[in-house]
Amino acid sequence: MSYENGDASVPTYSGWGASGRGHRHPRSVICRRERDTELAPTRIGAAMGNMICISNIVAVATVINLANRVDFILKRAVMPFLVYALVAGLVGLAAAWLRTG
């Protein structure tokens, strides 16, 4: 029986199932780490999208009483967005290169 597919019925040392209080099977921990490293770029991309999302900017501008300055806020968010994208992209490339090599 293979546990590499991330099945919820991974054996623990105190019995079967994810709700047990025992320690998880060591292979399930390895699979979870691999899955997390594959999802990390997706999570970073989602955070980057929220930085320049118009609906988020309008909501914040309304709360802080700058509703007529949405373009100003968006222009101020572009440079940190580009720096974040560059750093995240370089770190992602380095991680992929280290993982394969």
Image (cartoon, rainbow, N blue to C red):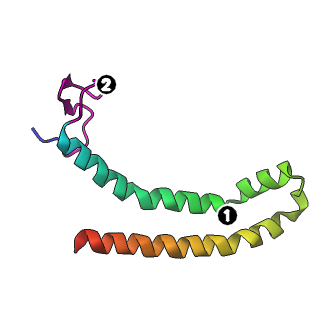
Quadrant in the rendering for residue 15:
top left
Residue 43 lies left or right of residue 15; in this view the side is right
> Residue sitting at 22 percent across and 42 percent down?
28
> Residue 101 appears at what percent x and percent y?
22, 75
The crowd level at tag 1 (other Cα within 10 Å; few <14, some 14-19, many 20+) is some
Query: What's the CA distance linking mark 2 and mark 1?
Result: 39 Å
> Residue 79 appears at what percent x and percent y?
67, 75
Q: Which residue is under mark 2?
A: 19
Q: Secondary structure at mark 1?
A: loop
Q: Secondary structure at mark 2?
A: loop
Judge whether 2 appears above or below 73 on screen: above
Q: Earlier in the sequence, mark 2 or mark 1?
A: 2
Q: Nearer the viewer, residue 13 or 97?
A: 13
The label on residue 52 is: 1
The label on residue 16 is: none
Query: In the current view of this chain or complex, which residue is farthest to the left?
Result: 1
Residue 54 lies left or right of residue 65; in this view the side is left
The crowd level at tag 2 (other Cα within 10 Å; few <14, some 14-19, many 20+) is few
> Residue sitting at 12 percent across and 42 percent down?
2
> Residue sitting at 36 percent across and 52 percent down?
36
* Eye-nearest disc, 2 or 1: 2
Q: How many marks?
A: 2
Instruction: Identify the magenta region.
Output: 4-24
